[in-house]
Image (spheres, rainbow, N blue to C red):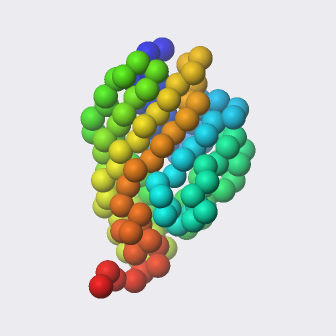
Amino acid sequence: MDPVRTIKSVYEAFGRGDMASLLAMLADDIQWWPAENHPYAPEGKPWIGREKLAEEFFKKIGMEWLSFGCSPVTFHDAGKTVVVEGRYFGVHRSGKKLDAQFCHVWTLSEGRVAAFHQYTDTAQLKQVMTGLTRP
């Protein structure tokens, strides 16, 4: 499967809530780098490995968000790297709505996702998650 098609399949699995299929597309030792100052990773370190990612990231989304999704818009094919621009949307249990742009950088190795880097508005994400308003 070509890299863009692989990454589109990841987004499709996430959109269906099919975590088993999504995780199967990730390398066993994936490095998942959240955006700087991400509320789920304040120490700025990546999640390494599918199980850790599932437990410390995806499980939290499922528990803390009433709805959460992403709409990839543009896919940039750079060989083993695919850059995706799009938007996050959702409603947190705080009652606040999220509508934030993102840029994802995906790196593939042997047909599976070996690394992921996220870039997004973490200030907005924190504001939505705490229910506080921006000054």
Q: Is residue 98 above or below residue 47?
A: below
Residue 23 location (% of width, % of height) = 62, 37
**Residue 84 can be seen, yes or no:** yes
The quadrant in which residue 44 appears is bottom right
Quarter containing the C terminus: bottom left
**Residue 24 can be seen, yes or no:** no
Q: Is residue 120 above or below residue 78?
A: below
Q: Is residue 107 left or right of residue 134?
A: right
Q: Residue at x 36, y 61 (%)?
A: 121
Q: Is residue 133 left or right of residue 63?
A: left
Residue 2 location (% of width, % of height) = 44, 15
Which residue occupies the foreground of this view, 26 or 114?
114
Q: Residue at x 46, y 21 (%)?
A: 80
The quadrant in which residue 133 appears is bottom left
Q: Is residue 28 left or right of residue 97?
A: right
Number of numbered discs overlaid on the protein picture: 0
Q: Residue at x 51, y 39 (%)?
A: 116
Which residue occupies the foreground of this view, 55 or 110?
110
Residue 82 location (% of width, % of height) = 40, 29
Residue at the outermost top position: 1
Residue 30 location (% of width, % of height) = 63, 36
